[in-house]
Amino acid sequence: MQNLHITAQQIRIFEAVARHKSFTKAAEELNLTQPAVSIQIKRLEENNDIKLIEVVGKKLFLTRPGKEMYKSCEKILGELRELTTHIRAQQEKVEGELVLAVVTPAKYFMPYILKSFLNRYPGVVPRITVINRRRIIDELKTNQYDLSVMGRVPEELKMEAYPFFKSELVVAAPPKHPLSRQKNIPLKQLADEPFLIREKGSGSRMAIEELFHKEDIEIEPFMELGSTESIKQAVMAGLGISVLPKHAIRIETKFGYIETLDVQGFPLSRDWYVAKGQDRALLPPAAAFLEFLQTVDINKLLAMSDTR
């Protein structure tokens, strides 16, 4: 069997082109010219006598071998990132305090991330402050945290933000709720239900309001509650329905204390970010944690925790 002729640079270039479906965007990401990217892809195809990319009109498509190549390149680059993290950890001792600010809903997945991180860096001592979004905006202005974990990064603050986790918002209802037997429930039907919602200014509430506003639907909150946990308890008590992070109710749904409804437009995807002050220099614990967040499979960590 003939060996594949490919360089490390070509792996990076092909992965970027395949991910963006664009030579131009890949070139911008890699700080190369568009012709340089095109030449490397052409050489890769010619050296291996294989067609990886097809351009139809102005759209770029991966051939079947191209799709397989993309999967392999993703895996190779992921392993290289893990290797880099491991080597750096060996070269520079990571220990001392890690000071984090975490918005309330993140407390349902952050402990599992921290556990995995501390297994790798046992010399790190985490100092975690769990606060709501309104308070975190005020406290971030003091620059007292190394890193902050939140669903939406305040535009008014000068921060560098990195997405690391894509969570899902689902419609949660008490057990045996009448709507639990229905499929593809119209979104407007939720307006007739007692609706439990977070306080104004919370990230999850903003995401929900954007969805309903887009569909020109008004929801009159039956109750406003100050935390995801209080809403979860209210749903289990039968006070109404709500929209909650899937990861926050995974144990309750597993044991039948909460049901998720099949509603049009859901699950609603939401990005989580880790952010730092634009001019803040990170000490080794914070730098290691930032890099760790960008490589860890959080869904896998949560799935492992659910085996208890």
Image (cartoon, rainbow, N blue to C red):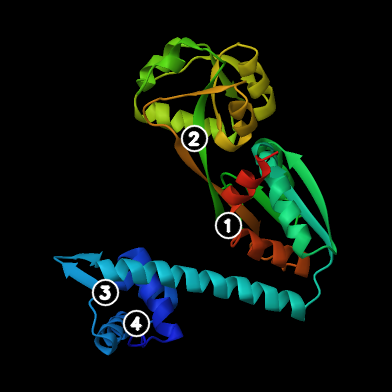
Q: Are marks 4 and 2 in contact (CB under 8 Å)?
A: no
Which of the 4 quarters of the picture holds residue 263?
A: top left
Q: CA distance from mark 1 to mark 4?
A: 26 Å
Q: CA distance from mark 4 to mark 3?
A: 20 Å
SS category of the residue bearing label 3: loop
Q: CA distance from mark 1 to mark 3?
A: 33 Å
Q: Which mark is residue 207?
A: 2
Q: Are marks 3 and 2 in contact (CB under 8 Å)?
A: no
Q: Earlier in the sequence, mark 1 or mark 4?
A: 4
For residue 232, side relative to residue 214 (left or right): right
Q: Earlier in the sequence, mark 1 or mark 3?
A: 3
Q: State the residue position of label 4.
A: 33
Q: Earlier in the sequence, mark 2 or mark 1?
A: 1
The kind of residue tagged 4 is Thr
SS category of the residue bearing label 2: helix
Q: State the residue position of label 3.
A: 52
SS category of the residue bearing label 1: strand
Q: Is residue 31 visible?
A: no
**Looking at the image, which residue is at 75% across and 64% down?**
120
Residue 56 percent across, percent down from the top left: 15, 66
